[in-house]
Image (cartoon, helix red, strand yellow):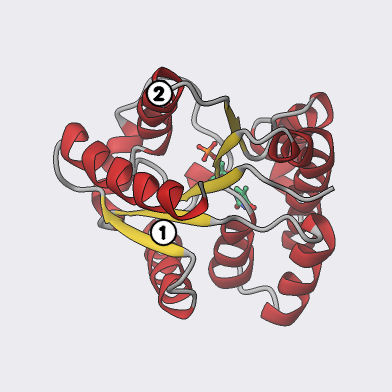
Amino acid sequence: MAETGLFITFEGSEGCGKSTQIRRIAEKLRADGREVISLREPGGTPIGEQIRNLLQYDDDASAMTSEAELLLFAASRAQLVREVIRPALERGAVVLCDRFFDSTTVYQGVARALPAAEVAAINVFAVGSTLPDLTLLLDLDAAEGRLRASLRKGPVDRMEQEGGEFYEAVRRGYLELAQKNPSRFVVIDASPDESVVAASIEAAIMYRLKEVV
Ligand code: TMP
C-alpha cells in the first residue's frame, strides 16, 4: 500500500531541545486537525523500550562494543518501522520521530568511527523503503548542548558520559550529512529562545505539508 502520511525526523546532539520542540509542533499539528504520532529512538515499541534500557542504563552495558551498539540501535528501529511508523503513514498520519537512522550514521559511523559503508548497509536493512520526507537538524554548539543536557533532571545515560571530542564529532558529522542531503535536511539554529526555534520548525514543516497535500 502506498504511504500517504508525512514522516519527519528530528536530529541533533544532546541538549539541542528536540523533545520540547517535538511536543510543541505535535500540539500545533493536532490543533490543526491532523493525526500526529510522536516517537523516540531508541524505543517506541515494547521491544524497543527494552533495547533502550539496555543501551542507555543497564549496568552491564559499559562493556558493550561499538558493533553491538550499532546493531541494537538498528534492531530497535527495524521494529519501530514495521510495528508503528508504516501503519501510521499508511493511515495518512504525520509521524514525528525524535532521532532516526541519521543518528546511527553520525554517532556510530562518525563519532565511534565504524566503517561508513557497513553502517549505511545496516541502516538500509533496518528501515527498508521507509525514509524520512523531512529531517530537521537542531544545530547547537557542542559545549552549550552538553551544558544544557547536564542541567536536565534524571539519570545520566551511557552515551552522555562521552567526552567533548565525541560531541564535537557528532556536531560536525551532522552538518556534513545535512550538506550531502540538502533536499531532505533543514538545519535549524537551536541557540535562540525556544519560541524562535519553534517558529523556524513550524515554517519548515508547513512548507513541506503544502507540497504534499
Ligand atoms: P536521547 O533519547 O536523549 O536522544 O538519547 C539517545 C542517545 O542514543 C543519544 O546519546 C544518541 C544515541 N543514539 C545513537 O548513538 N545512535 C542511534 O542510532 C540513536 C537512535 C541514538
Query: Dot 2, how many residues are within 10 Å of its Cα: few (below 14), some (14-19), or many (20+)?
Result: few
Q: Residue 99 location in percent, x, y?
A: 56, 46
Q: Residue at x 50, y 55 (%)?
A: 134
In this orientation, which residue lies closer to the viewer: 93 or 151?
Answer: 93
Visible residue check, residue 12: no
Q: For ligand 1, tell me if the residue under mark 2 lies within 8 Å.
A: no
Task: Kindly indicate the quadrant of the structure image that contains residue 5.
Answer: top right
Task: Kindly indicate the quadrant of the structure image that contains residue 201.
Answer: top left
Which residue does the numbered mark 1 point to in the structure image?
A: 167
Q: Mark 1 belongs to which amino acid?
A: Tyr
Which circle, 1 or 2, is nearer the viewer? 2
In this orientation, which residue lies closer to the viewer: 143 or 94?
Answer: 94
Q: Mark 2 belongs to which amino acid?
A: Asp
Q: Is residue 142 above or below residue 119?
A: above
Q: Is residue 65 above or below residue 24?
A: below
Which residue does the numbered mark 2 point to in the structure image?
A: 32
